[in-house]
Amino acid sequence: MERLTVELGNRSYPILIGDGLLGAIGRHVAPLLKRPRTMIVTDEHVAPHYLDAASTALAAEGIAVSSLVLPAGEGSKSWAGLARLTEWLIGEGVERSDHVVALGGGVIGDLVGFACSIVKRGCAFVQVPTTLLAQVDSSVGGKTAINVAAGKNLIGAFHQPALVVIDPMTLATLPRRELGAGYAEVVKYGLIDDADFFAWCEANGAALLAGDGEARHKAIAHSVAAKARIVAADERETQDIRALLNLGHSFGHALEAETGYSDRLLHGEAVAAGMVLAHQFSAANGLCPVADAARVRDHLASVDLPHSLASAGINTGGAELAAHMAHDKKVRGGKLPLILTRGIGRSFVTEDYGLDSVAAFLDGQRG
Ligand SMILES: NC(=O)c1ccc[n+]([C@@H]2O[C@H](COP(=O)([O-])OP(=O)(O)OC[C@H]3O[C@@H](n4cnc5c(N)ncnc54)[C@H](O)[C@@H]3O)[C@@H](O)[C@H]2O)c1
Ligand SMILES: [Zn+2]
């Protein structure tokens, strides 16, 4: 088992990574509890595979467990989902010192985290992520949210978990497409500031996606360590450090908006295409070697991830895509900070480029 720490003073918390850890969560959760009682929240895809194992592991430590199984999918990250979950927690008699267990992907993690930030003015929670995306990204860092009509993740809070338990074996049941979407976020850490890790991805990405346990463990541990470091340095994204995690996301956001946040394009798939576009835009502006942008595109293409507007299924004009970007949450004072790059592993934040130049660039990328 590997143990990392998110260093946030008296809110620091451990991240445990190890095959089979789900069957041992009781041992890791028990020391956190003031009373032997916890509530597990999961979704209907995850429950049949892992709810029993999680409940049994907690019960083995003498912890009383109740559970709530929500519908799978973004629809649960909503006002209705939040109302249902918070009412359920209150009905279960949740206390502030209790630790609610979020067992699932980023949807469950974001929803449970937000519910726990407001129920009884805040109770604790434990992340047990079961998608690659949640294991390498969303379970760490304390961003929690629901979606509203005006957009994704617009209502939320920073609320750090008390513990993150990652069992890579839970990925065995994850659909290949979801695995690929999570892998895009793994590659992101290499592209942000770690060229060696990007090279590792080029050499090992295919094996990871095919189920190689060692490659999975290494990718998760490396990614989570990077995220933990970035969160510790800039918890609330008040400097430009945490913003680097949005590499590929502004372009990706435009593609997600264009496809209506539907199954046509998963978040990670949009990020994959978005990272290629960010590199190509950087190259087009003389910031980044053309060969680096090609390397990024070629690697993502080699693992069947979208790597262009056409392969993302988009044939929309640049102005329309850029207009989606103008609605990004990250817009400040009318300007959208873009994450661009000087090459693989050399990303940076800039406000030097207007949306009109982005629109012209995107027009040129249409297939
Ligand atoms: N908080 C953050 O920092 C952060 C970062 C990135 C993304 N997010 C959020 O995360 C969400 C996306 O997360 P996600 O990609 O994990 O989606 P998800 O939670 O919807 O999971 C994807 C699908 O896989 C299923 N599933 C989960 N684990 C499984 C398993 N082990 N076996 C079989 N099926 C399984 C789910 O039921 C769902 O159908 C988005 O809402 C996004 O906004 C948050
Ligand atoms: Zn993302």
Image (cartoon, helix red, strand yellow):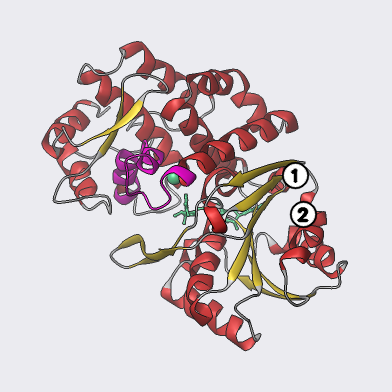
**In terms of secondary structure, what is the magenta stretch mainly?**
helix
- Is the shortest distance between ligand 1 and the CB of mark 1 under 8 Å? no
Residue 346: mark: none
- Residue 62: x and y, percent? 86, 72
Categorize mark 2 by other alpha carbons within 10 Å: few (<14), some (14-19), many (20+): many
Q: Residue at x 20, y 20 (%)?
A: 285
Instruction: Work out whether mark 2 precedes mark 1 in sequence or the reverse, and give the earlier one.
Output: 2
Q: Nearer the viewer, residue 8 or 199?
A: 8
Q: Which residues are magenta?
A: 232-257
Q: Residue at x 23, y 49 (%)?
A: 324
Q: Is residue 76 above or below residue 290?
A: below
**Which residue extends farthest front?**
9
Label 1: element kind: helix
- Residue 144: x and y, percent? 46, 61
Q: Quadrant of ligand 2?
A: top left
Q: Which of the 4 quarters of the picture holds residue 357?
A: top left
Q: Residue at x 41, y 40 (%)?
A: 245
Q: What's the residue type where badge 1 is placed?
A: Met
Give the residue number, with chain letter if any, for mark 1. 169
Which is closer to the viewer, label 2 or label 1? Answer: 2
Q: Is residue 107 above or below residue 34?
A: above
Residue 22: mark: 2
Q: Nearer the viewer, residue 269 or 335?
A: 335
Q: Is residue 230 left or right of residue 136?
A: left
- Residue 265: x and y, percent? 42, 45
Q: Is residue 150 left or right of residue 58?
A: left
247 magenta-colored? yes
